[in-house]
Amino acid sequence: MFQKKELFTIPNLMGYFRILLVPAYIYLYINAHSVTDTYKALAVLILSGVTDFFDGIAARKLHQVTELGKALDPVADKLTLGAVIFCLIRRINGFQYLFLVFIVKELYMLLGNLTAMKLNGKKLDGAAFIGKAATMITYWSMGFFLLFPGMPRAIQIFLMILCGGMITATGLYYLPVFFRLAKKI
């Protein structure tokens, strides 16, 4: 499992910080009454993204790649994206469907990983390129929703479909992997 010395590495501290930014984002967004207030929530999201970028660099440069960090980083990503998508339900019609796609895919991936851990004693290897691309596209799209709260409905729909499609494609990518695992049961 995780070693005690892994708890307080610089990259893992950044991961904890990213998780702590989630409730800060939610608070700022829910209490936003102006575009300026929304930009404050966006600033928290950008800070989370910058921290995400640098924790990976720090882990490699400082030789602090840990099993805890490998688990912590995607958890911080999912909590952040989930919070942003969930908050946008309040202001943009249709986001409930994107949130549903996100939740179904994440539960599916969680069950797949738990199965892999039970059968193989380890989680699936790191994220595939499509998963990283889906996360990046979703982060950027959510940033656009925050930066341009009055964007035309057609662009909103396009971005929601793009994110939903990428999230779905990521889940489908892992389908053969999970089928192979199921055959072992």
Image: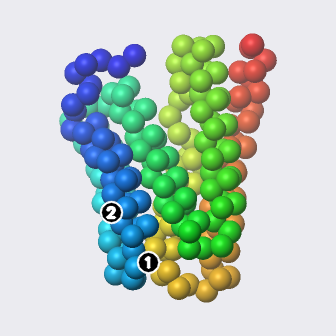
Residue 95 placement, left or right of 140: right
- In the rendered image, which quarter contains the N terminus? top left
Which disc, if any, is residue 61? none
Residue 174 placement, left or right of 149: right
Q: Residue at x 62, y 61 (%)?
A: 163
Position of 52 relative to 141 (above/below): above
State the count of labels. 2
Q: Which residue is mark 1?
A: 147
Look at label 1 and name its amino acid. Answer: Leu
Of mark 2 and mark 1, the one earlier in the sequence is 2
Q: Position of residue 126 (x, y in %)?
A: 50, 34
Mark 2: which secondary structure?
A: helix
Q: Would residue 148 be visible to someone looking at this image? A: yes
Q: Would residue 55 be visible to someone looking at this image? A: no
- In the rendered image, which quarter contains the C terminus? top right
Look at label 2 and name its amino acid. Answer: Val
